[in-house]
Amino acid sequence: MIDQHAAHERVNYEYYYEKFGHPADASQELLLPITLEFTPSDSEKLKERLSWFEKVGVILEHFGGGTFRVVSHPYWFPGGEEASIIEEMAEWVLSERAIDLSKLREKSSTLVSCKASIKANQKITAEEADTLLQRLAACKQPYTCPHGRPIIISFSNYDLEKLFKRVM
C-alpha cells in the first residue's frame, strides 16, 4: 500500500530542496506585497533575522510596528499558499535559538512540499498514480516522507489472512 500524500510530499520535497539551494534564481518581485502581522516581541526578533529569509529567496521588509511586507518570494511557491508558507517559516525562524541555513532550507522545503502535495482522500487518475510512482522511484530516498512517515507498507498473504482470522 502507498500513501499518496506522503509519496507526493517526498517527490515535492526533493524538488523544492534543490530549488531552495538556488534562491536568487527563483525570487520574483510581487506587484501586491503580502502583509503579515506579528506581536511586538516577535517583531523585534524578526527584524534581526530578516537576512535569513533572503537566503531562501523571500524578501521580507519591516513596515512599522508588528507589520511586515513580503515583497518577493520564489515563483515556485504553491499558488494561494504563499502567505501561510512564509508565516510558518517565520514561526520556525522565531523559535530557533541559532539558525542554520541547511536546517532552514530543509524546513522550508518540508513546508512547501506539504502544501503542494495531493491531499488526504483526494482522488487521482490511474495516469496520475503512474506518474507519481515513476517520480517516486527516481527519488533519492523513496521510503519516507520528509516528516519521517512511511510511504510504502506491505502485507504478505499470511498477514492479510491473519487480519481476517483465517490463520492463527
Image (tube, rainbow, N blue to C red):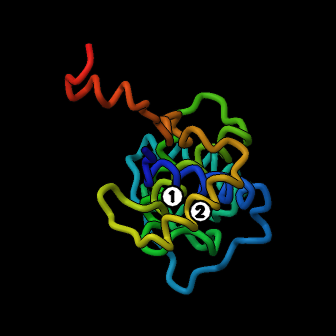
Q: Nearer the viewer, mark 2 or mark 1?
A: 1
Q: Furthest residue to the left?
A: 165
Q: Nearer the viewer, residue 142 or 85?
A: 142
Specify the amino acid type for callout 2. Leu
Q: Quadrant of residue 75?
A: bottom right
Q: Are marks 2 and 1 in contact (CB under 8 Å)?
A: yes
Q: Secondary structure at mark 2?
A: strand
Label located before the other in sequence (2 or 1): 2
Residue at numbered disc 2: 60
Q: Quadrant of residue 119?
A: bottom left
Who's the residue at 60% across and 28% down the image?
97
Q: Quadrant of residue 59?
A: bottom right
Q: Considering only vertical position in the picture, is 163 above or below 78?
A: above
Specify the amino acid type for callout 1. Ile
Who's the residue at 44% across and 40% down the image?
41
Q: Position of residue 71 (x, y in %)?
A: 59, 73
Q: Secondary structure at mark 1?
A: helix
Q: Furthest residue to the bottom?
A: 31
Q: What is the quadrant of the C terminus in the image?
A: top left
Who's the residue at 79% across and 71% down the image?
25
Label of residue 86 in the image: 1
Q: In the displayed structure, does residue 7 sit left or right of residue 99?
A: left
Label 1 Cα neighbours within 10 Å, binned few <14 / some 14-19 / many ≥20: many
Who's the residue at 62% across and 71% down the image?
76
Q: Position of residue 161 (x, y in %)?
A: 29, 28
Q: In the displayed structure, does residue 124 sit left or right of residue 90?
A: left
Q: Could you tell me if residue 85 is visible in this image?
A: yes
